[in-house]
Amino acid sequence: MTPYLIELNKFGYKMILCNSNSNYQEEIEYIEMANTQKVAGVITMSYSDISELVAPSIPLVAIEKKISNHFPTIVSDNYAGGRLGAEQLHKRGAKKLLFVSKAPIKDVSERRRQGFIDYCQENNLRYDIMLAEDKRYFSSDYDHFIDNHLINGKFQFDGVFSDTDEYASDFWHLLVKHQVLVPKDVQIIGFDAAKIYPRQPIFLSAIRQSTEKMAEIAVQKLLTQFKSEKIDKDNLITILPVSYTQGITTKS
């Protein structure tokens, strides 16, 4: 059960989970369900521009990306998370850092990258940015980058931070393929710290978003709209703190 389903169940609501896989046409179809009142409300995590598609009267809460000035938005402190990722690597002895992601960088990823860059610059840390091309087998770019930055088997960066667990995990496995020791020689931190199931052990060190708190506030703001209560236009964006979760890809 997701945190959102748990929270909605507390108030007697059911949840229909729709995954568009970033397919804009599918997102339009889901929004039409709300426009025709087939669902009571919407909690959305869409990075598409859907502002013109959603009627202002629909109860809606946006996660991570603002839809319009009509709806509340809940975001993690992504900038602080980028800074924290760099700080934790620095704190554990890393001196030359690498930010890893996939182009194009925008929205929450841009804030995470900027936080990383600002921390490195303020603390005189050497750093670089590695962005894979936006293509199907993008991880091959990571593989080539690692291969081109190995000197006598030693990778030329000792700390890697990524804006997602997915990319950090990809990079980790490719380093291992090149016989680079993690975390002895290279430490890695991702972003999300999500679990597929509650008992899943933590492997990747990561910046953790409070999904439980995010779900709680999202449902509260949705219920406020169900009751036709006035939305505070000066308090539409809620920013939640992030934290660091230790895994096996960084030194203790």
Image (cartoon, rainbow, N blue to C red):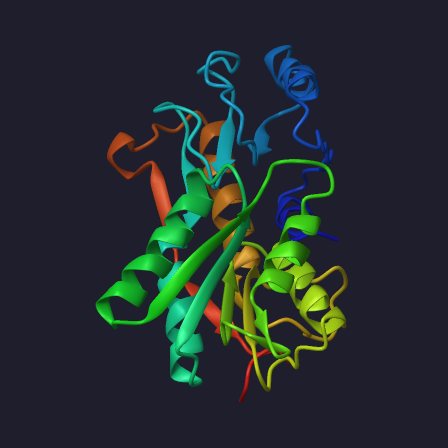
* Residue 153 visible within the image: yes
**Residue 72 placement, left or right of 151:** left
Residue sitting at 50 percent across and 64 percent down?
161
Q: Quadrant of residue 201?
A: bottom right
Judging depth in this view, the residue of 98 and 245 nearest the camera is 98
Residue sitting at 41 percent across and 59 percent down?
128
The x, y position of residue 234, in whole percent, is 24, 35
Judging depth in this view, the residue of 16 and 92 nearest the camera is 92
Q: Quadrant of residue 18?
A: top right
Q: Is residue 75 above or below residue 210?
A: above
- Farthest bottom residue? 252
* Residue 241 visible within the image: no
The x, y position of residue 8, in whole percent, is 64, 44
Q: Is residue 67 above or below residue 109?
A: above
Q: How many marks?
A: 0
**Residue 204 placement, left or right of 62:** right
The x, y position of residue 3, in whole percent, is 64, 53
Judging depth in this view, the residue of 35 and 154 nearest the camera is 154
Judging depth in this view, the residue of 153 and 36 nearest the camera is 153
Residue sitting at 68 percent across and 74 percent down?
202
**Residue 128 placement, left or right of 193:** left
The x, y position of residue 35, in whole percent, is 60, 12
Q: Is residue 65 above or below residue 67?
A: below
Q: Is residue 135 above or below residue 239?
A: above
Residue sitting at 60 percent across and 82 percent down?
183
